[in-house]
Image (cartoon, rainbow, N blue to C red):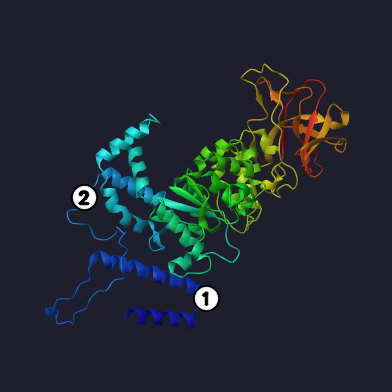
Amino acid sequence: MGNFFEDLVHQAMDATMEDDDQRALKAKFHKLKREVINDVRDIFPHGQITPPTLGIKGIRVKLPPKDPNDTSGPDPPGFSSTSAIPDVINIFNTYVQNELPTYLIYVPDKRLVGRNEVKRMFRKDVALITEEDIHSRLVVLKESCHTVERQDAIRDIVKDTVKFAVLSHRWLDSGEPTFYDILKSFRPYGYEKLVKFCEKAGEFGCRLAWSDTCCINKDSSTELEEAIRSMFKWYRDAHICIAYLSDTTSIDDLHKDVWFTRGWTLQELLAPWRMKFYVGNWQPLTRDLNDKENFEVIAALSRATRIPLDDLRHFRPGIRNVHEKMMWASTRTTTRIEDEAYSLIGIFDVSMMVAYGEGKRAFYRLMEAIIRKCEEWQIFAWAGTSSSDSAAFPDSPRGYRPLDSVDSNDALLPSTVWRGDRNIAMTKRGLEIKVLLVDLSEQEATVHEKIGTKDVQTDAYSSYTAGVVDYWCYDTSGDGILQPEQEHLCVLLRPDPHNPYAGWRKITTPNLVTIRTESKLRRTLTPVWL
C-alpha cells in the first residue's frame, strides 16, 4: 500500500507540476518519509501486531533493514540517558547544532542526515563519557596548554566522538551527485567517487562525511550562505580531509594536478590539520595517516603553491600578510566570479554577506572587510584593472604582483620605527591613506616598473605625482622618510579634474611602480582619498 501511494503521488506531480517544483516537493516527501520511518523504528524497534481484542485484523509494522553499525536505535538493557553528565550533554548539543555542517552523509548507507538525526545517532556514545574520561583528557591537554579547562576537555572528547571526514576534489565536468540526488537515493554520474570517499572515511573511523557537491541545499539561500561562511571552520574541525587528485600518479607529478588551479581548494589545503591524499584510482599517495606530517609531500605542495612549509602545516586565518595570501590565490580560478571572494572569507577570517549575482563587486566587499582591520602597506602591491567600486582595490586577486622583501640602509633601526600608514580607513570619500608625495616632473627620484622578475627604469610617468605608501616613520611628528637608494612602492596620482574636493585621482598601471631617491628625503605626509 505504501509503494502504491508513493507512486500515485509521483504520477500526480509529474502530470501537474513543473520540473523544479517536482524536484523540491519530491525531496521534501522523501525526507519526511525517512523521518517517519526513523520515528516508527524508535517506537516499534521489532515491529508489532495489534491485539486481537480490538476487533481489527493484525497489522505487522515492517521496517527497512537497519545497519548494524547504526547506534541510533533503542537503548540497550540497563542504559539510561539520565545517567549522562549534564555538562557533556549541553556541550554535545551545542557542538552539533552550531559547529557541525547542516547536512552530513551517514557513511554506512550513504544517506543524508541532519543535525537532529546526528544527535540521535550519537546520544548513547556521548552519554557513556565519564568523569574519568574528562580528567584524563584534561591532563593530556594541559601538557601543551596550561590554560585549558574542563569544558575544553569535554568538547575535545565530543569532537572525537562525533568525528567526520571532508572531501577536497576537483569537480567533474560532467556533473557530481547533488543534494537532491542523495536525498532521493539516486546514483548519478560521479556517484562512484562519493562511494570511494565514504569508504576511505570509514577507514579513518568516521561514521559521518561531508562533500560540498551534495551536502549543501543550494536551493536554500540561508543554508548556502551558512555553508560558504562556515566552510573553512568545517574543514578545520574535520577529523581528516581526504583529497582526491585524479590527475596525479606520484609525488613527482603532484604539481601538475588541476586541483592546484581551483579557488576553493586553497582553503581546503590550508584549513585542515590532517590530510590524506589519494591519486588516480584512489591509491594513497603515501603510507602515512597524515600527509601533512610527511616532509616529502609538504615540500612538493610548497613547490606547487609557493606557500611556506609552516603555513601548510599550521596555517592561522586572519588579516596578517594579506599580500602574501592574495598571491597564493592569484593563480587560481573559480567557475562563479563571486567565488573569487567567497573562497577567501575563511582564509582572512572576515565576515561578509553572500549574494550570487553581484559579480566582481563581491571582491570589492571582501577588500572592504579586510581593510577595516589591515595595517599593512603591502595591500597596495597590485597592478592592472581596478575595481569599478574603488580605484584603491584590484578587481580580483589576480591583480596582485610579487614584491621584493623589505630592505633598509639603516642597520640600527629602533624598535619604535614603522613603515607606511597604520590607520588606513574607508570613508564616504573613498579609502583614506596618508602618503609621501613626490613630484616626478622635478626628477627627485628615478621611477622603475616591476616587469616579471626585472626592475626596469622608465620615464613614462614623469607627468604624475608619486604617492609613496611604504615610507619610514621614526616618530609621531607626521613626517615620512625615504631612505637613499631604497626601493619604495608608490601609487601614481594626478589632480582629479572632475572632483576638485577629492584632490587626487589614482592612475591604473599594468605593473607595480617604485621609486628610488639619491638622498634621504623627509616630508610631511599628505592624506589622499582613493
Q: Farthest residue in the top direction?
A: 412
Picture coordinates of residue 440, whole percent (x, y): 85, 31
Picture coordinates of residue 175, whole percent (x, y): 57, 65
Q: Disc 2 marks which amino acid?
A: Thr
Q: Quadrant of residue 116?
A: bottom left
- Does the rendering let one see residue 343? no
Q: Nearer the viewer, residue 313 or 529?
A: 313
Q: Which numbered tag is attached to residue 215?
A: none
Q: Which numbered tag is attached to residue 82?
A: 2
Residue with the mark numbered 1: 19
Please, what secondary structure does the residue beneath circle 1 have?
Answer: helix
How many residues crowd around disc 1 within 10 Å: few (fewer than 14), some, or many (20 or more)? Answer: few
Q: Nearer the viewer, residue 360 or 413?
A: 413
Q: Farthest residue in the left direction?
A: 53
Residue 445 lies left or right of residue 233; in this view the side is right
Q: Quadrant of residue 38?
A: bottom left
Residue 379 vs 184, above or below: the answer is above
Q: Disc 1 marks which amino acid?
A: Asp
Q: CA distance from mark 1 to mark 2?
A: 48 Å
Which of the two discs, 1 and 2, labels the residue nearer the N terminus? 1
Please, what secondary structure does the residue beneath circle 2 have?
Answer: helix
Which residue is at a point 61% across and 49% down the rendered structure image? 254
Which residue is at a point 32% across and 37% down the rendered structure image? 137
- Does the rendering let one see residue 229? yes
How many residues crowd around disc 2 within 10 Å: few (fewer than 14), some, or many (20 or more)? Answer: few
Image quadrant where one finds the N terminus: bottom left
Picture coordinates of residue 245, whole percent (x, y): 57, 54
Image quadrant where one finds the C terminus: top right
Picture coordinates of residue 252, whole percent (x, y): 62, 47
